[in-house]
Image (cartoon, rainbow, N blue to C red):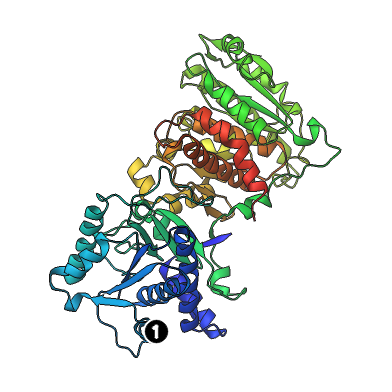
Amino acid sequence: MIKIVTVEEMRAIEQEADASGLSFAQMMQNAGRALADHVLTHVESYPGMRITVLVGPGNNGGDALVAGKLIADESECEVAFYLYRPRDESDPNFAAVKEAGLFTADAEHDSRFRALKKLISTSDVIIDGILGIGLKLPVKGEMAKFLSTVNKAITAARRIESPLRYQTPAYPIIGGIPAPLVIAVDCPSGVDCDSGDADPVAIPANETVTFAAVKRGLVKFPGAGLTGRLHVADIGLPGKLPGRDRVSLEMPAGTDIRALLPELPPNANKGTFGRALIVAGSLNYTGAAAMAAKAAYRVGAGLVTVGAPQPIIPILAGHVPEATWLLLPHDLGVLAEDAANVLKDELENYSALLMGPGWGREETTRNFLMAMLNAEAQRQARRHIGFVPTSTASPKTAENHTGHLPPLIVDADGLNLLSEIENWWELLPAGTVLTPHPGEMARLTGLTVEEIQARRIELAAAYAAQWQCVVVLKGAHTVIAAPDGRQAVLPFVEPALATAGTGDVLAGALVGLRAQGLPPFEAALTAGYVHGLAGTYAAEDLATHRSITAYDVLTALPDAVSAVEHAI
């Protein structure tokens, strides 16, 4: 897992690395090498590409100098360097550039930024090494004027046709990017790497190559919106660093998720892979149950049963022929309170339960939810009288008899109805997973959506602890938090997922993985990752972010699972 750090944490980690024998100078060389390798993967098929390296006064500028020199040495690219401030040739990295005879210019000797504008207008790639992680906003004075000039020059240059169209398997870009392609060094210039705040003159990047760890501001908006595709480069830090080990916030990679996938024993049967029960749907929202059921199967659940209001089952059955069906009492097409009595006799047959997608918010459905949760709360209270609580038991070993809720996921209108119940979190069984989007999180907490979005990471952790649930706070860079303090941020910023029904796909994937025995946090992490990757693949397949439906994401889910299975 990749650590997500504050600026202070990153500096402490670098100091520990220096004390252990990896000098700051060597770290800069390693960072420049990693940055150069990343740029070279994009330009190697385009001989003669023109690259402008923008060099700031700090360590980011040093990283950029090292990278630019390596790119010039190892490719046929034309590399030029533009410095915000002149550097003395006692700086070994600048001296190496001069000795190689590469073009350099600086703002101090460039009247009206004429050379800067000319370089940008003729560039295919711009490496932004101007400002680093130590920036404090606002950007003022000459630096603000400089960044503003860079931005205007990039905008003007993109009106000019360029041969560069860029796409790689690891970082697919829909439709290509017109040159100049902007690659930020560690963070986009003008972004606060702690808060994610951005100055109006901040330089938007198409990609950001950050070093050793993700900086918090790169996964918090508005900074996350200026980061582009995020790549984390290894700079050779030692394996054991106490400061890094203490960081609890992480971002998974494909190899991390691969290690969590349930095993596939050759002598398996459908019971090996669990039985998922999905209580979903109403006459107004028939598709939610189908999406969730299909997603549960796509992540490997052995058997999926859908419990739904009786009138909608004929509508759904032809769309999910693999599912079995549980006809539930209804009131004008929505779940009735009496449905709880039917379900209680069935629960012992299932290893995970999803409630909420497509319910609607009628009072009778809220009463159904209360009946289900009150029965569980009473059972737990009776069970704990005179005994040691056993809420930490795994899904496959926990006592399971009539009336006991299987490992639970609550999504969509299930969350909205929960918010109407006083002290609702006290009714939930241990290990429950909640999957709110920002609006649903606002209803559960009483905060505004704006407050939720401003403090996503902190609030997900705080409420996971308060509610003793795993919280999956959906959105760009979905946040997953466990009651024990574990926390992850997913790498995906995918507009294609901002459409109705994609949350049902996520919830279905989650219950399918819980049914197979994955613990709550690990199931949420795995489901969230393959769901985000499926959204990316769907957009790539259709060559647009605009036309994606939940069905497209569902269709791409097997490709995402396969990519994780083969991640290296």
Location of residue 190 by image quarter: bottom left
In-front residue for pair 353/141: 141
Location of residue 348 by image quarter: top right
Q: Residue furthest bottom?
A: 90
Q: Which residue is found at the position 71% from the left and 26% from the top?
A: 347
Q: Is residue 414 visible?
A: no
Where residue 225 appears, as percent x and y from the top left, is 36, 51
Instruction: Give the mark count.
Output: 1
Q: Amino acid at mark 1?
A: Ala
Q: Quadrant of the N terminus?
A: bottom right
Q: Residue furthest right?
A: 267
From this view, report whether residue 109 is shown above or below residue 407. Answer: below
Q: Which residue is found at the position 42% from the left and 30% from the top?
A: 547
Q: Which residue is found at the position 57% from the left and 23% from the top?
A: 289
Say few, some or many: other residues with alpha carbon within 10 Å of mark 1 (under 14 / 14 to 19 / 20 or more): some
Residue beneath label 1, please?
A: 96
From this view, report whether residue 562 is shown above or below residue 226. Answer: above
Where residue 357 appears, as percent x and y from the top left, is 53, 26
Where residue 463 appears, as percent x and y from the top left, is 49, 47
Location of residue 306 by image quarter: top right
Q: Residue furthest left?
A: 112
Q: Is residue 466 visible?
A: yes
Q: Quadrant of the C terminus?
A: bottom right
Q: Report helix, strand or loop for mark 1.
A: helix
In-front residue for pair 62/80: 80
